[in-house]
Amino acid sequence: MTSTGSDAVIGNARIVLADRVNERGWIALANGRIAEYGEGDAPAGSEDAAGDMVMPGLIELHTDHLEAHYVPRPKVFWDPIAAVVSYDAQLATSGITTVLDSLRVWREDGAEDVDGRAGVLAAAISSARDANLLRADHFLHLRCEIPMPSVVEEAKELIDRPDIRLMSLMDHTPGQRQFRDEGKLRDYYRGKGAGMTDAELDVLFERRFAYQKAYAATNMREIVALAHQYNIPLASHDDTTDENVADAVRDRISVAEFPTTMEAAHGLHQAGIGILMGAPNVVRGGSHSGNIAAVDLAREGLLDILSSDYIPSSLLMAALQLPQCAPAIDLASAVRTVTKAPAEAVGLADRGEIAVGKRADLIRVHVARDIPVVRSVWREGHRVA
């Protein structure tokens, strides 16, 4: 190869393309885009990747990990902009270059400290972005708890923002979907912070039953209509039954997050709805809630997208483990679940693969003792980590 006149060239790399792996090659970057790539030797002066993998930057559609930085202890609220910057740094060093920050769009007294804080965190993300403090590219994912009385009002307060890329329809009423086993939900709340007593949980659960009966049907119609009015893709959440799948089809769902049963996953797949599962589920070998294992869906050809959910480093780990868990999935296919597939699901056509003209959002990954380490991160051709 001769000199390309590019801003930078990365050579001696194992390059993960959308459909195959180039075992030894190079990539040239120019004006924030991928200008060229090929096999063999790169020109003199290129950056030596020392045989490490170079792949597209990871794309995260559902992470609520910002909450752990904003409320690091019960009743302890950190400066929201500082929390965003800290969270963003963790994302970048985990290889995530594009993220949909998942914000809770509802208020519920006595449950979670971060409830009702979507506006505060959305404003903090904007402030950090405007001040050029962020390494990753941030968009918003509005998590709408459908039975909550204020959910429509709170969604309307945020809906005009141009950075909203996804809205999800959630219902964590005890006894259904993720928490069909009410005991699992009790265990969850007992383990949060100082924990909740059974008497407190009885009150919380009764209130949730009442909210679902009074508000869920109307709120569902209004949130779905709002998303379609603003052309925002919709995600379903914890689909469990054929009825849940039928609702997803009716509401024109784009992504099904964390289906809990094989029955639901098959129905969603047949309907052409992309299936998103948790990367921690892959790494741990199963669901912490006792639902279907992500690797079982992968073996059935029912896994399209992975999400780090509550631990950013799990996204890269899970993608690299998938070929070991599901032999029909090769490395290129596994990496697509954390790059190209999530990008396409939310209309980000300019990124998610190593191809000429795409954004130069790239990561260099070294693997030692089966643990991946992100050595370098580029966002639009600029090194950010």
Image (cartoon, grey):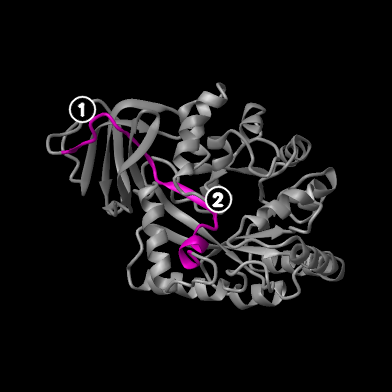
Question: Helix, strand or loop at disc 1?
Answer: loop
In the picture, the disc for residue 309 is 2
Note whether 308 is above or below 23 in the view shown. Answer: below
Quarter of the figure with residue 3: top left
Residue type of the residue flagged with mark 2: Asp
User: What span is colored magenta in the figure?
Assistant: 46-72
> Looking at the image, is mark 1 or mark 2 nearer the viewer?
2
151 or 251, which is in the foreground?
Answer: 151
Residue furthest right in the image: 213
Q: Residue at x 33, y 67 (%)?
A: 133
344 or 174, which is in the foreground?
Answer: 174
Please state, as top left, top right, bottom left or bottom right, where the N terminus lies in the image: top left
Question: Helix, strand or loop at disc 2?
Answer: loop
Residue type of the residue flagged with mark 1: Asp
Q: Is residue 55 magenta?
A: yes
In the picture, the disc for residue 41 is 1
Note whether 318 is above or below 91 in the view shown. Answer: above
Give the CA separation, mark 1 to mark 2. Answer: 39 Å
Residue 204 place in picture, x, y as percent: 76, 66
Quarter of the figure with residue 109: bottom right
215 or 156, which is in the foreground?
Answer: 215
Q: Residue at x 82, y 44 (%)?
A: 241
198 or 107, which is in the foreground?
Answer: 198
